[in-house]
Image (cartoon, helix red, strand yellow):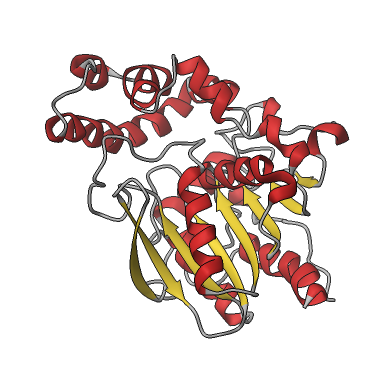
Amino acid sequence: MERIEPYQPAWPFRNGHVSTAYAGLLRGQRIRSIGSRRRIETPDHDFLDLDLAVRGEEKLVVLLHGLEGNTGRPYMVNMADRLLAAGYDVLAVNFRGCSGEPNHQLRSYHTGETRDLRFVMQWIVRHLPHWQYALVGFSLGGNVLLKYLGEEGADCLPGIQTAVAFSVPVDLASSSRQLDRGINRLYVRQFLKTLIPKALGKLETYPGHHLDREAIRRATSFREFDQAFTAPVNGFASTQDYWEQASSLPYLSRIPLPVLMVNALDDPFLSPDCYPGDPDTLGNVRLESPAHGGHVAFPRWTRTGYYWSEERVVHHLNSIMIQQG
């Protein structure tokens, strides 16, 4: 198999903030969307919107987006395009409330919410049995997939061959503190511009709650927002309880299959605790930590070409799924 070179960016992208901003704001899309949309009903009478590009390759890759993302983001669409070109089918998941329509329950998605992913994987196995499956997650989506695989452990669905996770805040408490520092607060401010209106909209739709509307409205950090909304809505005692229970770090050693995690060392979202080096902690997870890459970025000097992250995923999947097949 052809060897993939380590990520070696052009000089402007040797800064994590530049890489993150360029990939997030300036990157174009090679295709308009990912296949056709399919809505499925969840056991609690909510819904999930899935984008499917299935051509019968019998090798399906499930894509999971990051916080306040969706299946239409360039990093999702371009990853799907590269996978399709490499002979894989793709199913991209919109987390609850992220497909452009509010979901039907007070609770939505969060960094440690694995029940919906578990339901999606069971749905896939029912509709596409005997296929090979892989998962690729970005940031929040990466944490969700790692936690899910660790929770499943030895009971993991037999068709799942491997997974790749990029820019993963495996330790939420320390990552949140990292985002409270200096210029990183600008990222939090951008997230809160959509998180707060969504939360306030939920309060209007579900008036029988005991949440502090003003505390949600005034939130200027993830700690404040999670304390006022995310934690109580999802049954956690506090922000700290939510962060501890939602972090994927304690689950890594329980993952029963080969996983690649790629966290750039200049990722402005990640704390030192998001680069675990202990083999007992990592288990079957291989951690790659390029010096550069930013957060959900790894850009190249192109608007329409593939990024290194897309090539890295295809190389990893080919090494396992073709070998298995």
Q: Taking 251 as reference, is 33 left or right?
A: left
**Which quarter of the image is occupied by the C terminus?**
bottom right
Q: Can see residue 302? A: no
Q: Taking 22 as reference, is 101 left or right?
A: left
Nearest the viewer among 248 and 47 is 47
Residue at 74% across, 64% down: 316
Residue at 16% across, 24% down: 208
Q: Taking 237 as reference, is 265 left or right?
A: right
Nearest the viewer among 117 and 212 is 117
User: Where does the image place residue 103, in percent across and percent down from the top left?
Assistant: 26, 47
The image shows a total of numbered marks equal to 0
Residue at 75% across, 71% down: 321
User: Where does the image place residue 215, in percent across and percent down from the top left?
Assistant: 25, 15
User: Where does the image place residue 22, in percent across and percent down from the top left?
Assistant: 47, 52
Against 50, is 149 above or below?
A: above
Q: Can see residue 232? A: yes
* Residue at far bottom of view: 56
Q: Taking 27 as reference, is 99 left or right?
A: left
**Which quarter of the image is occupied by the N terminus?**
bottom right
Residue at 72% across, 67% down: 317
Name the quadrant containing residue 157: bottom right
Nearest the viewer among 35 and 125 is 125
User: Where does the image place residue 132, in percent across and percent down from the top left?
Assistant: 67, 71
